[in-house]
Amino acid sequence: MKKRIYYNDTDAGGIVYHSNYITFCEQARSELFFKKGIFFENEGYVVKELQAKYIKPAKLGDIIEIRTKPKEIKKASIKLIQEIFLKEEKIFELEITLVYVKSGKPSKIPQKHMEIINELS
Amino acid sequence: MKKRIYYNDTDAGGIVYHSNYITFCEQARSELFFKKGIFFENEGYVVKELQAKYIKPAKLGDIIEIRTKPKEIKKASIKLIQEIFLKEEKIFELEITLVYVKSGKPSKIPQKHMEIINELS
Amino acid sequence: MKKRIYYNDTDAGGIVYHSNYITFCEQARSELFFKKGIFFENEGYVVKELQAKYIKPAKLGDIIEIRTKPKEIKKASIKLIQEIFLKEEKIFELEITLVYVKSGKPSKIPQKHMEIINELS
Amino acid sequence: MKKRIYYNDTDAGGIVYHSNYITFCEQARSELFFKKGIFFENEGYVVKELQAKYIKPAKLGDIIEIRTKPKEIKKASIKLIQEIFLKEEKIFELEITLVYVKSGKPSKIPQKHMEIINELS
């Protein structure tokens, strides 16, 4: 997924506010499902833990690219690697563990979700 | 309500991002109810229209004050004036019309809400 | 400009948080300049006043379209109408007055900006 | 630092959007300096890496408390542990490494900053 950096993504330091890179990664994850016509209702992926490395900042007007790949797939959870690139240079890396929750409880990831996730490998 | 300006409230222009003043006003409205122990569920106030005047900017570290007063009260809607002050100088003004919605439909504003609104006059 | 609605655009009410429609309009304005390779530095458009009408909400996963046209053009300021559509139905309308500021002072809108603005008519 | 959860902190899932806990921690860090009258200009703390654990969610109206303590202090960088509590129960934990940057370069953390950091131990 590609994304333009707008004013509201930046802060008074002149660069993208650090939490927003984590938001961009979530948008990229959601887009994987939305573009297949899957819109969550009474279900979704809850963040359990994450590790982020900030390599270089992005700034106003930049177009970044978010790339997502699975690292570890379990029955009810998944660990992903998400990298943000600016002109083919990696500027940010996220490792994130998500739990699939349905009706408030951790549940088996549905088959049609697994197909989307496997396409990323 | 008083509020400190943090990095995430600002943008690369070095001042508070313009939509955030409107967010601060909503926080002040919600706080009126929250501090009385009223937490909305299946109900709430939906914005119908608003007019905002930007007088002076606030910047990182500033402490602003949001003052709220009713302008017009109807059965299912209310018009408020909300002003933001920085060191006793008005920097922003909002006139906002809100509709009380319960179970998805415009409804009569509850009596206990009216008491909170009347206290502002 | 088209934009997908993501989780961070919504709130606990299940729909887009009201300030965010105003943010989306700013992104559409910035995009007009960014896509022509104009990135502001030490200059920009400051919001003086705005009026917003909320017609219908957008929700998670929706793709909205923001359309921008000039209403009034002055030497150092401009009034725009920005409308947000969801599947060809207008759901939000903004009238916004912007002042062009360079090195901290209201200034004459540059010719290359005027060309971009005139293309919108 | 205590903080109320408002609508804009939540998402359509009904709970606080996951990036926002990281934002709350930054606000708590900034507040440590702001309340001592230190407002950064041409300097600041840049996030190098972070690890976050999500234990339980916070929701609309909740009042959370952010507690900050140093884990490792170096010449130009610092590692902090920040924990978020809801009614004395820990709901979130962040380990974050920050680099002090002045005029764009990693620099020795000033003595008056060190005093603030040491007070947290």
Image (spheres, coloured by chain):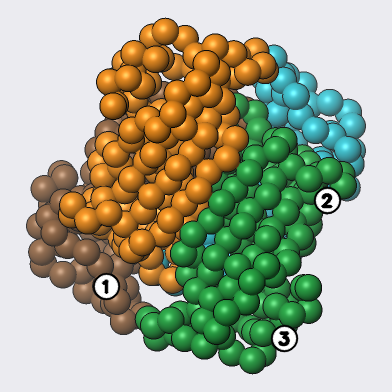
Chain colours: A green, B brown, C cyan, D orange
User: Where in the figure is residue C82, as x and y percent of width and height?
Assistant: 67, 54
Disc nearest the viewer among 3 and 2: 3
Per the rendering, the mark at residue A115 is 3
Parent chain of label 1: B
Q: Which mark is residue B103?
A: none
Q: Under tag 3, what secondary structure?
A: helix
The reply to whether dot 1 and dot 2 touch (C-beta < 8 Å) is no
Q: Nearer the viewer, mark 1 or mark 3?
A: 3
Q: B4 or C21, which lies in front?
A: B4
Which label number is shown at residue B41?
1
Q: Quadrant of the N terminus of chain A?
A: bottom right
Real-space Cα distance between discs 1 and 3? 36 Å
Judge left or right: residue A11 versus residue B23. Answer: right
Q: Quadrant of residue D30?
A: top left
- Visible residue check, residue B75: no
In the image, residue D62 lies at what x, y percent? 25, 56
Q: Which residue is mark 2?
A: C121
| Mark 1 to mark 2 CA distance (whole Å) | 44 Å
Amino acid type of the residue that numbered disc 2 sits on in the rendered structure: Ser
Instruction: Using the numbered discs, state the Cα–Cα distance from disc 3 to disc 2 in whole angstroms.
Output: 46 Å
Are labels 1 and 2 assigned to the same chain? no
Residue B40 visible: yes
Instruction: Give the residue at x 88% y 38%.
Output: C37
Provide the chain ID for the residue under circle 2: C
Q: Is residue C101 left or right of residue C11?
A: right
Q: Write the residue at 46% across / 32% down.
A: D79
Most extreme residue toward the top is D111
Crowdedness of circle 3 by 10 Å Cα count: few (<14), some, many (20+)? few
Residue C56 lies, in percent from the top left, at 52, 71
